[in-house]
Image (tube, coloured by chain):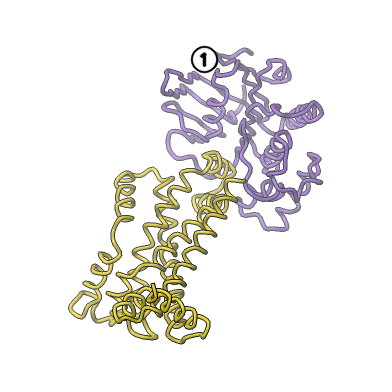
Amino acid sequence: MEFLADGAVRAARLLAGGSREVWGAVWISVWVAFVSTCAASVVGLPVGYAVAVGRFRGRRAALVLLNALLGVPSVGIGLLVFSFLSRRGPLGSWGLLYTPAAMVIGQALLAAPIAAALTRAAVSGLDPRALKTAASLGAGPVRSALTAARELGPALTAAVMAAFGRVFGEVGISLMLGGNILFYTRNITTSIALETARGEFGLGLALGAILVMVSFAINLVVHAMRGSEEAR
Amino acid sequence: MTGVPALAARRIRRSFPGGFSLRLDELAVEAGTTCGFTGPNGAGKTVLLETLGLLEPPDEGSIEIMGRRVFPGPASREARMSLAIVMQRPYLFRGTVARNVGYGLAARGLSRPERTRRVDACLELLGLTRLAGADIRRLSAGEARWVAIARALVLDPAILVLDEPAAHLDEPHAVALDGLIRGMHGRTTVLFSAHDPDQTLGCDRVFALDNGAVKPVR
């Protein structure tokens, strides 16, 4: 218990004292997760919408694939992207391995199926009269999609937040593609893994506390948005 | 009948699980006239108007608007734009009454000042000006229906399809609606359904529906 208490005290000091190491990792976590979530949303939201409303050959297969991709572990995606970005890989000449860009690519691949699946679920729950009404008033496919997005605003924001939450807390991709380089690719989760292994439990605990707080905050926002949607 | 009918449908069939099927052999509605459809609940009025209003495709048959085939095959944007429909349970988009009424105008690419001018004029015509900025969630069922009617009327469509337009309307609004429909005679082709056959007394043509079968009355 003393070990835990000491760790907690050190964690509190690090957080209060503005440790460069701690807040550097937090900053890298936040902006890499933010950029990768944006990239995942640009792809995932339209894909989710298309799978929900489209009537095309292979739609069922797309749905199965989408759900299957939700279960792919982050380390699996890390391995896949690593094989492309490593020096001997097809994209090795780009020199992206162990850079934040590589982390963004991996995290975007992790987040896109989440954004797509949650968008599909949200659009499937949209009142079918909404899209019929839009079409009857002369809306083309793009305007209809934008109308659906507006009607589903809170649900789609929740989908994006859920994707952000997933990548913010992942460790496999960050470790494999980022390389855990201090002040460059070391984020909260890779710091926790490293510092805990080195016996720096206080630092690990401080970062863990931030991770949990951000996770709680995301869940609170998602919950509030779902609540406002239900109250509508 | 002279000239090309505003809306023509032939041998329309639309079947549903459970055995119900819509059956319409021939319909030709002359431009500028009013056509009423009556029948009891479940007779197929909504199914028919959703089909003629291009919201749902039939299983078979053909539909033409102003002489141009819109089914089978994809309905041209121009044909779709010439028609406006108010569903039995209209859907209003999030936001204000004015945004809803202006939606179709925006879809047609009208400039913002032009949209504002036409929306304001339509709201004034229907006595909705005081509700222009109101959130649609605060509207009564009757007000929501009136807004949906305004949203269709503002488009000045060649063909207006109204599914039980008088439902949820109080008497003054029902009378006003009747006046509006009569006022459109000669200018707009109106197709509407009504539970009460008396509401179709002023129609040029009337059809009765019975368990999916559409039969001409006059």
Front in this rendered view, residue B74 or A188: A188
Q: Is residue B180 above or below residue B104?
A: above
B132 with respect to B86 (left or right): right
**Dot 1 falls on which chain?**
B
Q: Is residue A229 above or below residue A24?
A: above
Residue visible at 37% across and 76% down? A3
Residue visible at 57% across and 29% down? B7
Q: Secondary structure at mark 1?
A: loop
A128 with respect to B1 (left or right): left
Amino acid type of the residue tagged 1 in the rendering: Asn
- The quarter of the picture where residue A177 lies is bottom left
**Quarter of the image where the C terminus of chain B is located:** top right
**Quarter of the image where the N terminus of chain B is located:** top right
Chain B painted colour: purple
Front in this rendered view, residue A46 or B30: A46
Residue visible at 54% across and 30% down? B52
- For mark 1, does the 10 Å Cα neighbourhood hold few (<14), some (14 to 19), or many (20 or more) residues? some
- The quarter of the picture where residue A69 lies is bottom left
Residue visible at 62% across and 24% down? B2
Image coordinates of residue B30 in percent, x first then y, are 62, 26
| Residue holding disc 1 | B211
Image coordinates of residue B129 in percent, x first then y, are 80, 46
Q: Is residue A189 above or below residue B35?
A: below
Image coordinates of residue B215 in percent, x first then y, are 56, 14
The yellow chain is A
Front in this rendered view, residue B8 or B130: B130
